Amino acid sequence: LLCVVVGRIWVKNEKLPLTELYNTINDSVAIKDILKRRGFDVIYRENVTKREFRDVLKKFYRKLGRGGTGVLYFSGHGLESSGQNYLVPIDARIDAKSDTEFEAIALNRITKRMQGAGNRLNIVILDACRNDPFAKASGVGGLAKSEPIGLFVSYATGAGKVASDGRFGENGLFTKYLIKYMKQPLSLQKVFRNTRTAVYKASNKSQFPAIYDQTINGDFYFTLPKITVPDIIPIPVPSPLNNGSGEFTPTKKGITIVDGLMWQDEKYTSKEKKAYNGDRTEYGKVLNWHNAIKYCKNLNLGGYNDWKLPNKKELENLYKQKSKLKNFSSSYYWSSTSYEGYKDYAWIVGFYSGYVDSNHKNGNYYVRCVRAGE
């Protein structure tokens, strides 16, 4: 999971009529901290020049290419020119609107690179005013919208409008409420809908954040909801694993059977974890995809040696019947199914929310092996 946070204060150019911003750094630091606490790999910069902005974006793209969820947060000044969005670095020298494309950073180039990374979800959050300082001369104002497929974009305010920077030393109005709802167990869409409603009311209907949602497949949570897993429910299975009473009678230690499939169900102690150099947790092994394949292939459990890494469908079905699970982590588990079109990526399934994602096969996730039941 990745995030770029770019905070800036103001553009040192008297010919460009942009107001001084006091709270962009406060906003950026607050977003950085909350995302770090939620497991994001954060790249953070303040008051960037155009060259520094490009350098940090290159670093972001390299990390983004390894999978996960990409998040770009920018707090500062934004401009629109000829239907394109631009983010303004601190050393921009924009004497006329035509200078914008040479002095600022084009947003559409950023979103195209993010989309080209092939990861499941990208989020762009722009806490910037959307008024055009050259509107009187050109008659055009407001940041244009950006809607590539698979991208979620949120602006702090509507086209042609100004976003409140808040009181000195605090947070801007948009980021203030964004932080509040990011901390709650809400879906991505609901976080920003709630933020929009709160900002609209608090600004006396003068600021209305814009949302462009082009995401597909599944839900994303900054803060995962708590899920209470019921007690294990006995299930009937065919003989010889059934004692005739309709209740499941385990005959092999370390095995759970769901829908006729045998699932490895070992729980390791801290002593065993230490003995295995930390690649085992209390919920089992944590390996990269290649080693996970080998581990299941070489597993000998319950007298069986034909175990395999479960495919994506098997893991999704298992999550749906989580009431029958035992000793499973709430984190992600590897599937044997490679990501379509990207041979270096494979699907993973989260056992907290059921969220399905993909990641580079060199990443480390939990492993549970499976075999056909008897």
Image: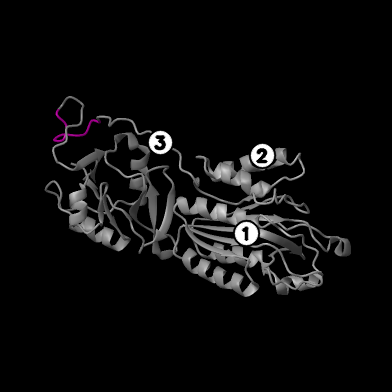
Q: Residue at x 81, y 62 (%)?
A: 133
Magenta residues?
235-243
Q: Residues within 10 Å of mark 2 (few under 14, many from 20)?
A: many
Give the label on residue 74, or none: 1
**Residue 18 x, y percent position in the rendering:** 77, 62
Q: Residue at x 19, y 34 (%)?
A: 238
Name the quadrant containing residue 287. bottom left
In front: 219, or 133? 133
Circle 1 SS class = strand
Q: From the viewer's perspective, tell me whether residue 364 is left or right of residue 39.
A: left
Q: Residue at x 72, y 74 (%)?
A: 102
Name the quadrant containing residue 254. top left
Give the label on residue 217, or none: none
Q: Please, what is the dominant secondary structure of the magenta stretch?
A: loop
Circle 3 SS class = loop
Q: From the viewer's perspective, tell me whether residue 245 is left or right of residue 21.
A: left
Q: Earlier in the sequence, mark 2 or mark 1?
A: 1
Q: Residues within 10 Å of mark 1 (few under 14, many from 20)?
A: many
Whether residue 83 is visible to the viewer of this picture, yes or no, is no
Q: Nearer the viewer, mark 1 or mark 3?
A: 1
In front: 145, or 270? 270
Amino acid under disc 1: Phe
Residue at the front extreme?
169
Q: CA distance from mark 1 to mark 3?
A: 33 Å
Q: On screen, 255 above or below 117?
A: above
- Disc 2 target residue: 198
Q: Earlier in the sequence, mark 1 or mark 3?
A: 1
- Disc 3 target residue: 227
Q: From the viewer's perspective, tell me whether residue 274 is left or right of residue 125.
A: left
Residue at the left extreme?
303
**Residue 9 x, y percent position in the rendering:** 68, 62
Circle 2 SS class = helix
